[in-house]
Image (spheres, rainbow, N blue to C red):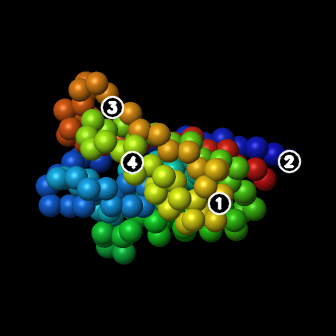
Amino acid sequence: MKFRTGIGYDVHRLVAGRPLMLGGIEVPHSMGLDGHSDADVLIHAVCDALLGAAALGDIGQHFPDNDPAYQGIDSKLLLKRVGDLLKEHHFHIENIDAIVIAQQPKLAPHIPAMRSTMAQVLGLDEGDVAVKATTTEHLGFAGREEGIAAMASVLLSL
């Protein structure tokens, strides 16, 4: 068996008037993330990690932000397409480990739903998907609540 690792990173600016989507669920907050799609930084980081591990490009290559087909799209659909692409190339997702970097809102109560949602979309056991959250102790753009970032690491087998 051959193993491949991948990492992903994404960041979006917080803006008024949009829902906050993280890990495929809406998280109650006064602001949401700005982007061409629903701007779910967690799913976008996971997609990039998965694509990178399989050497299949990146999320922008597969779902360009200048393509009207992806305007406002639910990122769970992007994640599903990435999962299907991996299957076409005979990759199996062994695990996903991700972290969301946000000063607010507090994410701990929402992590189980994020894990469950992403696992379900990818056809994985919930135990194969880890999600964590941290603040930046009020440092940087995340600390000033200007945006939210996410990072992900994955292991694939072939």
Given residues 24 and 36, the one toward you in this image is 24
Q: Disc 2 or 1, which lies upstream in sequence?
A: 2
How far is disc 1 from disc 4 in space, using C-alphas?
21 Å
Amino acid under label 1? Leu
Q: Are marks 2 and 1 in contact (CB under 8 Å)?
A: no
Picture residue at 36% right of the left edge, 75% below the top: 69
- Mark 1–mark 4 CB contact (< 8 Å): no
The reply to whether dot 3 and dot 2 touch (C-beta < 8 Å) is: no
Closer to the chain start, of discs 3 and 1, is 1
In the displayed structure, 122 sits above or below 146; it is below
Q: Amino acid at mark 4?
A: Pro
The residue to which callout 1 is attached is 124
Image position of 155 (left or right of 68): right
Which element carries disc 2, helix, strand or loop? loop
Q: In the rendered structure, which amino acid carries the disc numbered 3?
A: Thr
Pointer 2 residue: 1
Say whether residue 52 is visible: no
Label of residue 135 in the image = 3
3D distance between C-alphas at marks 2 and 1? 19 Å
Note whether 9 is above or below 55 in the view shown: above
- Point out the tag, 3 or 2, that comes first from the N-terminus: 2
Q: Position of residue 150 (x, y in %)?
A: 41, 42
User: Going from the N terminus, do you reach mark 3 or mark 4 first?
Assistant: 4
Q: Residue furthest left?
A: 16
Q: Residue at x 24, y 61 (%)?
A: 19
Closer to the observer: label 1 or label 4?
4
